[in-house]
Image (cartoon, grey):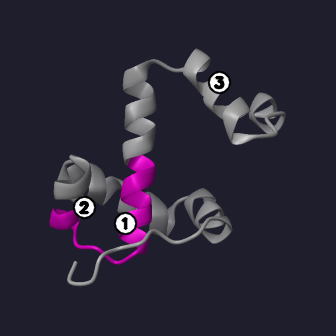
Amino acid sequence: MEAVLQLQTAEEAERFFRDLCTLGELRDLGQRWAVVRLLDAGLHYSEISRLTGASTATITRIASWLNHGEGGYRLVLERTPPVAVEAGR
């Protein structure tokens, strides 16, 4: 975690995480964060699954961590702009 705190820009973070993680791991991390943001936006699990490709079991686990975890998701959600969701979704 100390190494992550040394990163100063998004470009530095991209370079570091690309060296640290496999493409599959990066995809999984990105998918999880997308699920968090869509859950926070109030989308239904089936819609989140359709948009992200995540299984409803994965979405359920992420929702549990979002609501009963260590608060990390909420912390970052508060520091980032909300996801734009089209009307009717």
> Residue 44 sits in which quadrant?
bottom left
Q: Which disc number belongs to residue 48?
A: 2
Which quarter of the figure is the C terminus placed in? bottom left
- Asked whether the residues under the numbered discs 2 and 3 touch, taking CB atoms below 8 Å apart as contact, a structural biologist would say no
**SS at mark 2 in the image:** helix
- Asked whether the residues under the numbered discs 3 and 1 touch, taking CB atoms below 8 Å apart as contact, a structural biologist would say no
Crowdedness of circle 1 by 10 Å Cα count: few (<14), some, many (20+)?
Answer: many
Q: Residue at x 19, y 48 (%)?
A: 55
Task: Give the main secondary structure of the magenta stretch.
Answer: helix
Give percent across and percent down for residue 76: 63, 60
Specify which label sits upstream in the sequence, 3 or 1.
Answer: 3
Give percent across and percent down for residue 43: 28, 73
Q: Which disc number belongs to residue 15?
A: 3
Q: Residue at x 52, y 72 (%)?
A: 82
Q: Residue at x 40, y 75 (%)?
A: 41
Q: Is residue 39 left or right of residue 67?
A: left
- Asked whether the residues under the numbered discs 1 and 2 touch, taking CB atoms below 8 Å apart as contact, a structural biologist would say yes
Crowdedness of circle 3 by 10 Å Cα count: few (<14), some, many (20+)?
Answer: few
Q: Is residue 2 above or below residue 24?
A: below
Instruction: Check disc 1 and give the amino acid type.
Output: Leu
Specify which label sits upstream in the sequence, 1 or 2.
Answer: 1
Disc 2 versus disc 3: nearer the observer: 3
Residue with the mark numbered 1: 38
Instruction: Check disc 3 and give the amino acid type.
Output: Arg
Query: Does the stretch in magenta take in 33?
Result: yes
Q: Which disc number belongs to residue 46?
A: none
C-alpha gap between disc 2 and disc 3? 28 Å
Q: Nearer the viewer, residue 83 or 61?
A: 83
Give percent across and percent down for residue 52: 26, 50
**SS at mark 3 in the image:** helix
Q: Which residues are magenta?
A: 32-47
